[in-house]
Image (cartoon, grey):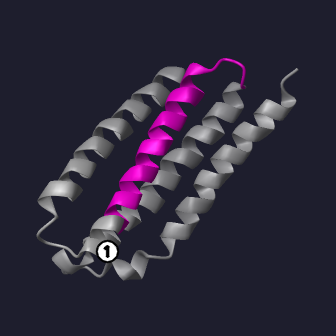
Amino acid sequence: MNKTILITAAILGITGIVLGAFGAHGLKALITVEAQQTFETGVRYQMYHALFLLFVGSINSISIKAKHLIYYLTLVGIVFFSGSIYGLATNALTTFDFKIIGIITPIGGLLLIGAWVRLFIEFLKMK
């Protein structure tokens, strides 16, 4: 499980950097400043949680069961939160109206909070 978590963290980090550069340079002339800032929020949270998964995958003092839950909460949370933000920020560039799926943004945020809460619980259990 640790290897899967660490590989996922690396992939999220790589794609976060690529998307950050794309947002800062490739989208600059195509979307509003407000949309650029929104896009950057998605990148920032993706990178925070890539680092979070690096930590979770590296620490041995939390249970495998907790790691599984934290991993899936974080992964789905990032897809929902950052993914929907990327869509919403670039909404003007597509024919699909990403506002329809905007409801998954807060769901993704709740999943990310859940991952942190589960880690907190594991820390409280430590002797």
Residue pushed farthest right? Answer: 127
Whether residue 94 is visible, yes or no, is no
User: Which quadrant holds residue 12?
Assistant: top left
Residue 70 placement (x, y as % from top left): 62, 40
Tally the numbered discs: 1
- Give the residue at x 34% y 73%: 88
Q: Is residue 32 left or right of residue 116?
A: left
Looking at the image, is 74 positioned above or below residue 37?
A: above
Residue 9 placement (x, y as % from top left): 43, 33
Q: Is residue 51 magenta?
A: yes
**Along the line of sight, the residue nearer the viewer: 86 or 44:** 44
Quarter holding the N terminus?
Answer: top right
**Along the line of sight, the residue nearer the viewer: 6 or 123:** 123
- Give the residue at x 38% y 81%: 99
Looking at the image, is 78 positioned above or below residue 1?
A: below
Residue pushed farthest front? Answer: 33
Quarter holding the C terminus?
Answer: top right
Q: Which residue is mark 1?
A: 34
Residue 94 placement (x, y as % from top left): 18, 76
Q: Is residue 88 magenta?
A: no
Magenta stretch: give its range.
38-62
Residue 84 placement (x, y as % from top left): 39, 66
Q: Is residue 113 left or right of residue 45?
A: right
User: Which quadrant holds residue 8?
Assistant: top left
Q: Is residue 75 left or right of residue 111?
A: left
Task: Please tell me whether the stretch drawn in magenta is mainly helix, strand or loop.
Answer: helix
